[in-house]
Image (cartoon, rainbow, N blue to C red):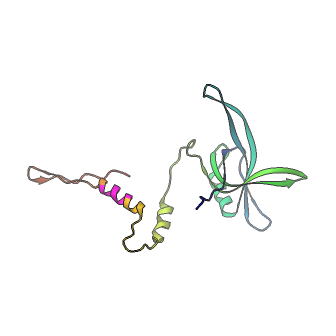
Amino acid sequence: MAIPTREALSGFIATDPQLAETSNGGHRFYARVGIEQFQRNEDGSFTQLESEFTNLVMFDKAAERAHEKFQKGDNFVAEGRSNVHEYQGEQREQFIASRIGHDNNRTTYTVDRSRQERAGADREAPERAAGERDPAAVALAQREQALQPETTATSGTVQADRAAVAR
């Protein structure tokens, strides 16, 4: 089975993002984005070249979320597709993103998983045949077991359980 893949684009937001309403009542996110270019030198070092620029657009709920989270100067990684369209008689290239996130190689941020945990609680694990074990669940159980606090007896008293190591 082939791994499903999509185009990706990484770069930086070069202009203040704009959120506009489309003719059908949805939303459109637009920003001019830059893509840094580098040239590898014979000695293995890199020289930064002029950045390339293109338009990045998103639509509907994704556009609204992107407009809330991104500002000029932010580094990002986006998934989507390239598209060439005609604008005032001229062919222009743009990247239509379906997903976008901050580039964790260049951005320091905090992750809030509270939404993910609530959504995960509503999901049910797929049913498995009797005796079949999920390899990820087995690995997690082994890791949990390794992190369990040990109890030892010293001079007839039981030492208090040690705090579990943060995961």
Seen in the image, is 90 located left or right of residue 121?
A: right
Please tell me which residue is depicted at 71% across the width and 32% down the height of the picture: 49
- Quarter of the image containing the N terminus? bottom right
**Direction from residue 50 to residue 149 in the image, left or right:** left
Q: Position of residue 149 (x, y in %)?
A: 26, 54
Q: From the viewer's perspective, tell me whether residue 21 is left or right of residue 4.
A: right
Residue 163 percent across, percent down from the top left:
28, 52
Q: Of all residues shown, which one is farthest toward the top? A: 43
**Residue stretch rendered in magenta on the structure:** 139-145
Q: Report the predominant secondary structure element of the magenta stretch.
A: helix
* As drawn, 44 above or below 74: above
Residue ranking furthest to the left: 156
Question: Furthest-front residue in view?
Answer: 1
Q: Please provide percent x and percent y for residue 165.
A: 33, 50
Q: Nearer the viewer, residue 141 or 89?
A: 141
Question: Relative to the observer, which residue lies in front, 82 or 149?
Answer: 82
Q: Give the image quarter of residue 15.
A: top right
Residue at position x 38%, y 74% in the image: 130
Name the residue at the right extreme: 89
Is 26 covered by the magenta stretch?
no
Q: Is residue 122 above or below residue 6?
A: below
Residue 155: image location, x then y, percent: 8, 49
Q: Residue at x 63, y 49 (%)?
A: 77
